[in-house]
Amino acid sequence: MTADPQAPLRADAQRNRDLIIAAARAIFTEHGPEVPMEDIARAAKVGIGTLYRRFPDRDALIRAVAVDSFARLLAEVRAAAVEEPTAWDALVRIMHHSTDLQLTAQLAMLSAKALQILKEDEAVCEQREELLVELERLMVRAQAAGQLRPDVGAGDIAVLIAMALRRPPAKTPEIGRLSTDRCIAIMIDGLRAHPGAPLPGRPLVRDDLRR
Amino acid sequence: MTADPQAPLRADAQRNRDLIIAAARAIFTEHGPEVPMEDIARAAKVGIGTLYRRFPDRDALIRAVAVDSFARLLAEVRAAAVEEPTAWDALVRIMHHSTDLQLTAQLAMLSAKALQILKEDEAVCEQREELLVELERLMVRAQAAGQLRPDVGAGDIAVLIAMALRRPPAKTPEIGRLSTDRCIAIMIDGLRAHPGAPLPGRPLVRDDLRR
DNA sequence: AGTATGTGGAGGTTTACATTCCGCTTCACT
DNA sequence: AGTGAAGCGGAATGTAAACCTCCACATACT
């Protein structure tokens, strides 16, 4: 029932549905996917009943948000790949600026619960695969150009991102943002070609992330 | 009532107390400080009643574990500072090998709840301060020796560590460990002197972490 | 204007966790 | 080896929070 196109929604209902997804996106990004349904309804300025009619349970909502967020991120990645002068610049841009990235990583890698749900969703899995393919393509290009260190795989980047974007509670929001930015910048410097020390083990690749 | 030395515990009681702390340490490290008390009791092979007699509530337990974990970490840091040939090596050793580091970071930076509790504990705050002083000392040495990039502060490292050590759930424990190791190695390379790009903002220092 | 569709949110139900309590066990001391 | 104090386990109870249903009322579409 995630998307049920055979009965087009009434205009107000469609509007509410969008509001709910937007609110869920914001709240999931901030507090993870296990916040009470009521909070989401409140943020969307909608009654709980409405939320439940549109998404019969939390899983459905998570799936819908994930589809949305993955699609946005994919678009962002493709845009960066085309618009930036080099693959490396595209990677840097994505890592630094994407909030969809944050949500996606959170859903796909940090919450065991969400992972479980998404793993069983055909559409999401496909999107995910596309995303990783796109990422790998960028990385190969950046490695060929000698900008990205050769001993990392897409899995490494994914892990790095997932870690970096789990922002710890900070003194103030500004410090929180600053610390995330700096952290990512340090990671990026660690990803440049000709770094100090060879990495342990072997590169993590796409398949290492599948669970 | 965390430590009540006026009535020395019976031998078996003392043993159980130690078991409980050890179990709590393991479980907190793995799953954060909000796991059900019952899980901790089970892991310690002890009845819930016992747990509650020794630690009247979760806060007391968290405090006790924190004191223990901070002390261990401080010892580890000092040992590394003395035993390793350079300050840089000491930093690397600590980042790579310390599980107490993981727990400490988790308690001190990632869980809002734990933070709240610890912030109000005199002893813990002092330990924390000592720890950061020691870290800063190492960093200054490593920067003076030209090994650590000059534009980072102790706060940056603390944030980095807290992020890195929040291990996402992985396909297998081996992959989990590998990904953490690689992630840390990448961060370390990003921390070396003469990296690619200057970091944004200003160094995060000790005080930025106080909340 | 009439009807199908959508809405809000009060409240019953479920769940999960914290905490207490007390009959039985183990220790420590003589 | 006997005895009382200290300790133990875990079933039972309390409690808070989140889930989700339901229905009188509202809104959109034709």
Image: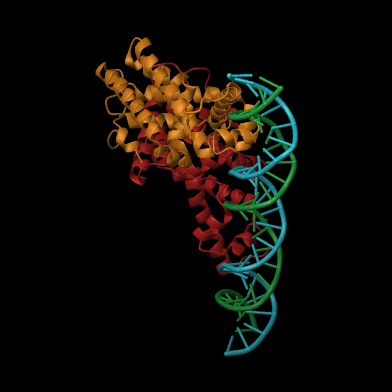
Chain colours: A orange, B red, C green, D cyan
**Closer to the camera in the image, A43 or A180:** A43
User: Split into 4 quadrants, where in the image is the C terminus of chain B?
Assistant: top right
The vertical placement of B85 against B35, above or below, is above
**Closer to the camera in the image, B177 or A65:** A65
**B184 with respect to A46 (left or right):** left
Q: Please state the horizontal and vertical placement of residue A184, each as a whole percent of the image.
A: 45, 24
Q: Answer with the quarter of the image where residue A91 lies.
A: top left
Residue under the point 43% across and 26% down: A70
- Evaluate whether residue A191 shows in this view: yes
**Closer to the camera in the image, A80 or A159:** A80
- Evaluate whether residue B81 shows in this view: no
**A211 with respect to C9 (left or right):** left
Residue under the point 37% across and 25% down: A190
Q: Please state the horizontal and vertical placement of residue A21, each as a whole percent of the image.
A: 54, 27
Q: Please state the horizontal and vertical placement of residue B157, each as a whole percent of the image.
A: 48, 30
Residue under the point 30% across and 36% down: A207
Q: Please state the horizontal and vertical placement of residue A19, each as a whole percent of the image.
A: 58, 24
Q: Answer with the quarter of the image where residue D10 lies.
A: bottom right
Q: Answer with the quarter of the image where residue B11 lies.
A: bottom right
User: Split into 4 quadrants, where in the image is the N terminus of chain B?
Assistant: bottom right
Numbered label tally = 0
The vertical placement of B13 against B166, above or below, is below
